[in-house]
Structures are given as structure tokens and as C-alpha cells.
């Protein structure tokens, strides 16, 4: 290995270097940014106690959890924060910079895997969102169609390009790169095709969703567009509706229509079928609820 390459490697003798080396092993820029924010919170906590994070023990981690609880963090958020700092300490252990992971034996928040903070839309709400998005602009229409009709992640939709469109055995598809750089083909349905034809307007190259100057569409702007459309479409919980809400809705609508779990898994690009099963479980809990039968009895049905 040349000296020039060695010189570019982080100095892992100290905490900042360990963190940078750990972050560099994460492929996704979005993942790196999220982890960087989490580790910064933890580092600030240690700094407040005058402590090097490489010398932190379990008691410091537990004090951090109490502090975050007092700040109003939910159980799910606390679990995410612990997951991040657990990962960086595992990396530090592998480098020999610490002997043990101080997070290892800390009691974790209990998260109900069958519950999700993501808002799901009804079929009528989903239809109204498509209608409102089409009236707003071709770009907003295409975004909502990709999320709702294709079940794409917002990162996948924003990265989609005209060059990624293709045809196989008479079926149009969009080649998508998901988590872990895994490729999948998402069928382009008539609703999606209509939206993409409008936004491309004859183009055969470049990003599907871009600004007027041709630059990538900012993720936060895309979020605001979804929230704006949800409000105009009179979605019941429009203030909580996010791009993931539309992907979530795509999954639950497919499952409610009887589409197999395996096909929904392939459509959404879930690596683990258990992730898709969560949508099925949530839908099943409501579909078979005794309350519907009670309502029939009380109404004379």
C-alpha cells in the first residue's frame, strides 16, 4: 500500500478517527448522515461530562438514555440512537480501541414490531392524492405515482432516471437501485406511465424528477410536496403523511387485494420477507377485528 493512500486513512487512535473510519464503511450517503447525527449527540453527551467516548461505560450510556427521555425522545427513537452507538462501539472493539462495548448490556426500549408510526391511507384517500398531484404539476404527479403505484422509497424515486426505463417481453419496467445497492425491476403500470410521460415530456435521458434547471430534486422539497398534496386531498392525517406513507399504503392495498406476500416483497424490494409480513400483520389485525361484527350487530346488519 502506498504512503499516499495510508495518509488518507483516518487516525483511529482517537474517537473522531474511529467514527470517521466507521462511517466510511457505510455505503449510503443518507445512512452516513443519519449515523453522523446520532453519534454527534452521543459525543456531545460525553463531552458534557468531560469524558472521552472511548472511556465511557454502561453508566454513561444509561445516563444518556435518561437525558434523551427527558428531552422527549420516543421509545422508537431511543432504540435507533442506541443502535447507532452500539454499531460504532462494535467497530471500535474490532479495531482494539476499546475492550468492550459499553452499550452491550444496557436494557433496550421495547418496540412493538407490529406497530408503525407511519400513516397509511385508505383507497379513496390514495385516489384523491393522485388526482390532486396530477393537477399540481407533472413532477409532483410523477413523485406520487412512483411512491404510491410503484411502492418505491423516496430515495429510489429521486434517483430514478429516464435511462433506467426498459421493456421486457412487452412489459415496461423501471430499474431501481434499493438498499444495499440491490437492483430490481419495478413494473411501470398505466398510471405510472401516464405520470412519467408528462414529467419526461419527450426526454429520453436525465432524472425523472428534477428541478427546472435540471438539478436533482431536494429530498426535503419532495417531502413537502407529499404533505401539501395530502392536505389538499383531505387525507385524515395529512400532517403526518410522508413519502413512506405512500409506500406503506401501496403494500397494504396490495395485501388487502389478495396479492401474495412474495410478490409484494419483490415489488417493494424487501430483502427479508419478515419486513413485508409486518404490513400483512397490521392489515390482518384490522381486517379481522371483532369490532366490525359488533357494528353489524348494533346496526342490525
Image (tube, rainbow, N blue to C red):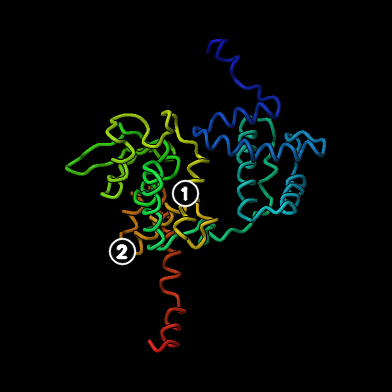
Spot occupied by residue 295 in the image (x, y as percentages of width and height): 44, 82
Q: Residue 295 — which label?
A: none
Q: Going by the picture, which residue comes out furthest to the bottom?
A: 300
Spot occupied by residue 34 in the image (x, y as percentages of width and height): 58, 39
Q: Residue at x 82, y 39 (%)?
A: 49
Can you identify the residue that label 2 sits on?
Answer: 258
Q: Residue at x 37, y 32 (%)?
A: 207
Nearest the camera: 9 or 27? 27
- Distance, label 1 to label 2, CA atoms, is 27 Å
Q: Residue 226 — which label?
A: 1
Q: Residues within 10 Å of mark 2 (few under 14, many from 20)?
A: few
Q: Going by the picture, which residue comes out furthest to the right?
A: 50
Nearest the camera: 208 or 263? 208
User: In terms of image quadrants, where is residue 255?
Assistant: bottom left
Q: Residues within 10 Å of mark 1 (few under 14, many from 20)?
A: many
Cβ atoms at labels 1 and 2 below 8 Å apart: no
Query: Is residue 207 depicted above or below 242 in this figure?
Result: above
Q: Is residue 191 left or right of residue 285?
A: left
User: In terms of image quadrants, where is residue 199?
Assistant: top left
Q: Secondary structure at mark 1?
A: helix
Q: Going by the picture, which residue comes out furthest to the top?
A: 3
Q: Residue at x 59, y 17 (%)?
A: 8
**Which numbered disc, 1 or 2, marks the residue that appears first in the sequence?**
1
Spot occupied by residue 2 in the image (x, y as percentages of width and height): 54, 10
Q: Is residue 57 left or right of residue 146?
A: right
Q: Secondary structure at mark 2?
A: loop
Spot occupied by residue 82 in the image (x, y as percentages of width and height): 64, 46
Amino acid at each position: 500500500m502506498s504512503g499516499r493512500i495510508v495518509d488518507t486513512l483516518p487516525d483511529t487512535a482517537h474517537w473522531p478517527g474511529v467514527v470517521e473510519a466507521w462511517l466510511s464503511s457505510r455505503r449510503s450517503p443518507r445512512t452516513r448522515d443519519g449515523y453522523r447525527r446520532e453519534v454527534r449527540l452521543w459525543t456531545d453527551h460525553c463531552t458534557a461530562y468531560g469524558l472521552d467516548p472511548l472511556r465511557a461505560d454502561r453508566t454513561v450510556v444509561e445516563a444518556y438514555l435518561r437525558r434523551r427521555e427527558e428531552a422527549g425522545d420516543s421509545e422508537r427513537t431511543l432504540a435507533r440512537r442506541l443502535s447507532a452507538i452500539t454499531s460504532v462501539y462494535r467497530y471500535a472493539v474490532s479495531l482494539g480501541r476499546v475492550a468492550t462495548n459499553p452499550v452491550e448490556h444496557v436494557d433496550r426500549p421495547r418496540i412493538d414490531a407490529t406497530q408503525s408510526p407511519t400513516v397509511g391511507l385508505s383507497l379513496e384517500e390514495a385516489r384523491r392524492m393522485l388526482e390532486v398531484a396530477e393537477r399540481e404539476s407533472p413532477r409532483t404527479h410523477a413523485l406520487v405515482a412512483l411512491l404510491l403505484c410503484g411502492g418505491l422509497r423516496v430515495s429510489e424515486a429521486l434517483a430514478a432516471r429516464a435511462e433506467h426505463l426498459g421493456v421486457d417481453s412487452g412489459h415496461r419496467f423501471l430499474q431501481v437501485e434499493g438498499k444495499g445497492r440491490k437492483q430490481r425491476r419495478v413494473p411501470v403500470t398505466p398510471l405510472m406511465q401516464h405520470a412519467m410521460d408528462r414529467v419526461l415530456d419527450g426526454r429520453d435521458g436525465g432524472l425523472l424528477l428534477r428541478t427546472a434547471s435540471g438539478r436533482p430534486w431536494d429530498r426535503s422539497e419532495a417531502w413537502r410536496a407529499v404533505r401539501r398534496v395530502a392536505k389538499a386531498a383531505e387525507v385524515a392525517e395529512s400532517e403526518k403523511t410522508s413519502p413512506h406513507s405512500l409506500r406503506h399504503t401501496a403494500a397494504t392495498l396490495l395485501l388487502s387485494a389478495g396479492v401474495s406476500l412474495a410478490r409484494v416483497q419483490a415489488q417493494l424490494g424487501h430483502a427479508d420477507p419478515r419486513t413485508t409480513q409486518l404490513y400483512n400483520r397490521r392489515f390482518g389485525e384490522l381486517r379481522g377485528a371483532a369490532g366490525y361484527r359488533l357494528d353489524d350487530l348494533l346496526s342490525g346488519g
